[in-house]
């Protein structure tokens, strides 16, 4: 499901067990003071309102679901219904939507097994620091979504482990956001600043299964793909991220260079750089069947249409 660009304060939905209402109210107050818009049933549902309809709409309109966990959570029908809906939305959006928040005096055994794999906000220790980190993440993600069109998704575990393996003693880990408008997604990735840009590019390309070439049998053409990263308008080189001033929070653009070759005439038709960051914008304005006269070159719109199936698996 496509997400709308946020033009408002980040919004969260609070799910809690009734015995935890006092702590839930305190959290609502703290988040509101820190600039987060909170959907909280006790503040919004009035006499005669349909509580189920309110819940459904509030979840649909929120950017995140904060699930408060305590010893009182287990077996609460509506809490379990809400966090089941939250996990389903995680999968639908392909990003973090449900964030567990462990309340003080909660035992580890009170955390549902299905949620233990998630990194949770732990208010049992240094609650103020944990809360500030949560708010910083929510606001940072909202800025990324506003600027790049979608909320960031966490890197898959295998890719995260691969990046951790590159960490050398004394090296600093930074968060970078890799994006391309072709894939309508933004990947959040923790990498050593001492790693080369080539490592990041290769890791992302292999994780997404991006191909190097494809054959178009209908047109008897071979499309070859070259991938590279750009930062602040410049193509990254083989130097380390640190040497190219890539710092924590940097946004790296994934570009795709296309070269197409006539297999019948055995000649390259074009070596011009046609990157998806520009091509996909003009594709709808060109006749998909058009060719550029006697040059024998494909129109950019047709090229985008022909190449697009190579990347459809990333969208699913």
Image: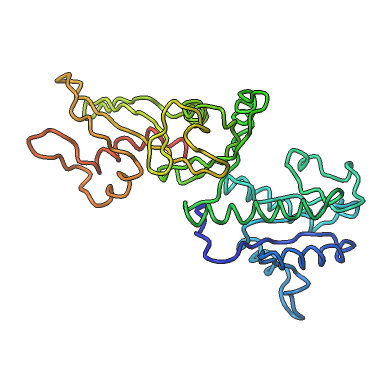
Image-quadrant location for residue 268: top left
**Numbered circles on residues, count:** 0
* Colouring method of the image: rainbow
Q: Which residue is rendered at x = 62% and y = 58% of the image?
A: 63
- Looking at the picture, how far across and down is residue 20, in whole percent? 87, 61
Q: Is residue 77 left or right of residue 13?
A: right
Q: Which residue is rendered at x = 47% and y = 54% of the image?
A: 147
| Front-lying residue, 146 or 182 | 146
Q: Is residue 113 left or right of residue 159?
A: right
Q: Is residue 250 left or right of residue 270?
A: right
Q: Residue furthest bottom?
A: 47
- Looking at the picture, how far across and down is residue 258, in whole percent? 30, 32
Q: Is residue 268 above or below residue 276?
A: above
Q: Is residue 175 above or below residue 149?
A: above
Q: Residue furthest top?
A: 266
- Looking at the picture, how far across and down is residue 210, in whole percent? 43, 29
Q: Is residue 47 above or below residue 154?
A: below
- Looking at the picture, how far across and down is residue 19, in whole percent? 90, 62
| Front-lying residue, 164 or 8 | 164
């Amino acid at each position: 499901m496509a997400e709308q660009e946020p033009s408002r304060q980040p919004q969260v939905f609070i799910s809690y067990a009734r015995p935890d209402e006092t702590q839930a109210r305190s959290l609502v107050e703290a988040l509101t003071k820190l600039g987060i818009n909170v959907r909280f049933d006790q503040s919004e549902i009035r006499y005669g309102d349909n509580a189920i309809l309110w819940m459904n709409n509030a979840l649909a309109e929120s950017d995140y679901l904060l699930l408060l966990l305590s010893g009182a959570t287990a077996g609460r029908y509506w809490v379990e219904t809400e966090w089941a809906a939250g996990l389903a939305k995680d999968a639908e959006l392909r990003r973090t939507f449900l964030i567990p928040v462990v309340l003080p005096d909660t035992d580890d055994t009170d955390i549902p097994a299905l949620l233990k794999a998630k990194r949770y906000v732990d208010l049992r220790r240094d609650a103020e620091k944990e809360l500030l980190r949560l708010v910083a993440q929510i606001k940072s993600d909202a800025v990324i979504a506003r600027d790049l069109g979608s909320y960031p998704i966490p890197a898959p575990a295998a890719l995260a482990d691969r990046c951790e393996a590159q960490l050398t003693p004394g090296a600093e880990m930074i968060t970078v956001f890799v994006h391309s408008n072709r894939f309508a997604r933004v990947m959040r990735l923790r990498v050593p600043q001492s790693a080369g840009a080539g490592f990041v590019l290769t890791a992302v390309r292999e994780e997404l299964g991006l191909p190097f070439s494809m054959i178009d049998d209908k047109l008897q053409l071979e499309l070859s793909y070259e991938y590279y990263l750009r930062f602040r308008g410049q193509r990254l080189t083989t130097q380390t991220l640190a040497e190219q001033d890539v710092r924590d929070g940097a946004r790296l653009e994934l570009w795709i260079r296309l070269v197409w070759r006539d297999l019948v005439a055995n000649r390259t038709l074009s070596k011009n750089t046609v990157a998806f960051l520009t091509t996909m914008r003009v594709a709808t304005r060109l006749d998909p069947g058009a060719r550029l006269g006697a040059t024998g070159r494909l129109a950019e719109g047709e090229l985008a249409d022909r190449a697009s199936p190579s990347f459809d698996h990333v969208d699913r």
